[in-house]
Image (spheres, rainbow, N blue to C red):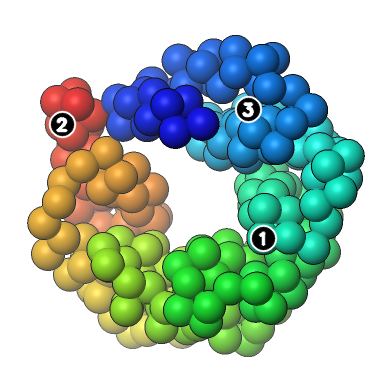
């Protein structure tokens, strides 16, 4: 499994998601019906979400959840990770209401089985928070965002995740209050996130991914020059990989 994931990292660090998909599908045929297949399904969910392949993503959600059931995993951390990834995909394709019960299941298992400082909890809170914003549950989302930040601030290299959460919070403020009424709060959150993005020293494939993810948010709020800078920075990293 380590060899499979190491090769996957090579592809994703080069932003070569087509090769990453082929790699995962090859090994899925070899490992179908085994616990290894569940890991591969989870990786595919991430690929299809990032590349906006809705039909493949939704099909993989069904296959992954069926695999959890077939293996009898249910209340395990592995199952929770699958629920989280499936819910995140559903939200990405405008199905937040369908994904919320899966977020809730993942949250229950993670909070029971993981340390309160585990970064997997931070990722769950952040992704679930964005779904709650979509559903108009702003106060609940804010609670989860703040929990995510608390966890990630204490984690090694967690500053990039904090930056993403701060931008999610800015988008939540805009959704709840509007650009004018939320202007001061939005500006503060954008500034905090930018500080974290600038001071992060390791400019690797993950930094490139985060930068490309943050750029559209800055562009949306009118920070066109910085959005372009983040995109160009991301491209340079991928080209040099």
The residue carrying pointer 2 sits among few (fewer than 14), some (14 to 19) or many (20 or more) residues within 10 Å by Cα, namely few
Q: Distance between the residues labelled 1 and 2?
A: 37 Å
Q: Mark 1 sits on what residue?
A: 77
| Mark 3 vs 2: CB contact within 8 A | no
Q: Distance between the residues labelled 3 and 1?
A: 26 Å
Q: Relative to 147, say whether 129 is above or below.
A: above
On residue 236, the disc is 2
- Name the one closer to the observer, 121 or 137: 121
| Mark 1 vs 2: CB contact within 8 A | no
Horizontal side of 60 relative to 168 (left or right) equals right
State which tag comes first along the sequence, 3 or 2: 3
Give percent across and percent down for residue 165. 42, 68
Q: How far apart are marks 3 and 2 (CA)?
A: 25 Å
Q: Mark 3 sits on what residue?
A: 53
Give percent across and percent down for residue 126. 53, 68
Q: Relative to 18, say whether 237 is above or below.
A: below
Q: Residue at x 16, y 46 (%)?
A: 203
State which tag comes first along the sequence, 3 or 1: 3
Give percent across and percent down for residue 241. 19, 26
Give percent across and percent down for residue 84. 67, 56
The quadrant in which residue 201 appears is bottom left
Q: Residue at x 51, y 17 (%)?
A: 23
The quadrant in which residue 109 appears is bottom right
Q: Nearer the viewer, mark 3 or mark 1?
A: 1
Q: Can residue 229 be seen in this view?
A: no
State which tag comes first along the sequence, 1 or 2: 1
- Name the one closer to the observer, 223 or 158: 158
């Amino acid at each position: 499994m380590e060899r499979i994931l190491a090769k996957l990292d090579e592809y994703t660090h080069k932003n070569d998601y087509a090769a990453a998909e082929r790699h995962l599908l090859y090994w899925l045929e070899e490992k179908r019906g085994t616990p290894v297949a569940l890991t591969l399904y989870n990786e595919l969910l991430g690929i299809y979400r990032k590349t906006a392949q809705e039909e493949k993503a939704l099909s993989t959600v069904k296959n992954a959840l069926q695999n959890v059931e077939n293996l009898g995993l249910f209340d395990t951390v592995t199952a929770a990770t699958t629920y989280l990834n499936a819910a995140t995909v559903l939200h990405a394709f405008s199905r937040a209401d369908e994904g919320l019960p899966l977020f809730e299941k993942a949250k229950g298992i993670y909070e029971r089985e993981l340390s309160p400082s585990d970064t997997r909890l931070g990722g769950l809170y952040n992704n679930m928070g964005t779904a709650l914003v979509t559903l108009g549950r702003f106060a609940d989302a804010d609670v989860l965002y703040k929990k995510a930040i608390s966890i990630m601030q204490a984690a090694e290299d967690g500053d990039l995740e904090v930056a993403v959460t701060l931008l999610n919070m800015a988008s939540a403020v805009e959704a709840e209050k509007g650009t004018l009424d939320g202007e001061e709060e939005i500006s503060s959150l954008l500034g905090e996130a930018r500080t974290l993005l600038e001071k992060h020293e390791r400019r690797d494939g993950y930094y490139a991914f985060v930068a490309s993810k943050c750029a559209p948010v800055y562009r949306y709020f009118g920070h066109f020059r910085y959005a372009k800078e983040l995109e160009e920075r991301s491209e340079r990293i991928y080209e040099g990989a």
